Image: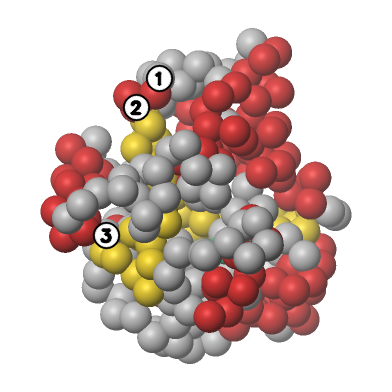
Amino acid sequence: MRIYEAADYQGMSRRAANILSAHVILKPGCVLGLATGRTPVGAYRQLIEWYKKGDLSFSETRTVNLDEYRGLGPESPQSYRFFMQEHLFGHIDVRPENTYIPDGLAPDPDAECRRYNEVIRSLGGIDLQLLGIGRNGHIGFNEPGRAFELETHLATLSESTRAANARSFPAGADMPRQAFTMGIKSIMQARRILVAVSGADKAEIVRRAFTGPVVPGVPCSILQLHPDVTLVGDRAALAALRETGARICG
Ligand code: PGA
């Protein structure tokens, strides 16, 4: 595993964007696995800036997102389709038909999960999967305690995840209780994984993820078994990992 430390969120975002853009430049038709949440927003902003400068084109790039709330469609400002449109897709030249996200409104959840697995397979798998880590150790919506072997499935959100994500919903709104998510198996099949972390509230889970035992109670700990993981974090998020003596590049 490679670990890169930046001074702050902006530096971390720039480093993550560097790695994403390198993939797009070296293999324009690459399949990028993308994530939502606060963490990747700065990296997406940086990619948009480079695109606008003419340094980068996504015209052949394919994207598959990790997850989507069940019950929310693309018009809903809280849906992840809406998020991706607002924070990345709407500002670059990626073709809409090359961007894949589970359909939150799919009437038959099992069929939707099968369809999404087939999408990933038909694209030839994921070249680089970008991941954030939840404070409870989740990746995508794979909450603690779920089986490692799942592909795309319908997950029930933990109370801590609902509380953390409530900030994106209007006060008093009924937040979804379920979401479609790639499973740990889908994530582990990506050829490369890029984990981005920021802030002191992630420091402890980052330490447990990469130096603790590999257990379903800490879903992100499975990443220790992936052969090609790059972790980029700001100083605050990597502080506890650094204390364990982990080798960290500047
Ligand atoms: P965050 O979420 O980027 O908003 O911290 C990460 C996650 O929950 O996966």
* Labels in figure, total: 3
Q: How many neighbours does mark 1 have within 10 angstroms: few (below 14), some (14-19), or many (20 or more)? A: some
Which amino acid type is marked by label 2?
A: Asn
Question: Which residue in the rendered view is the most extreme toward the front?
Answer: 172
Q: How is the image coloured?
A: secondary structure
Is 84 positioned to the left or the right of 163 in the image?
A: left
Residue 70: x %, y % from top left: 36, 57
Which amino acid type is marked by label 1?
A: Arg
Q: How many neighbours does mark 2 have within 10 angstroms: few (below 14), some (14-19), or many (20 or more)? A: some
Q: Between residues 138 and 55, which one lies in front from this camera angle?
A: 138
Question: Which residue in the rendered view is the most extreme toward the top?
Answer: 54
User: Residue drawn at (80%, 45%), measured in percent from left and top?
Assistant: 10
| Figure quarter occupied by ligand 1 | bottom right
Q: Quadrant of residue 134?
A: bottom right
Which amino acid type is marked by label 3?
A: Thr
Residue carrying label 1: 95
Asked if 226 appears above or below 125 in the picture, the reply is: below
* Numbered label attached to residue 98: 2
User: Residue drawn at (46%, 21%), measured in percent from left and top?
Assistant: 94
Residue carrying label 3: 152
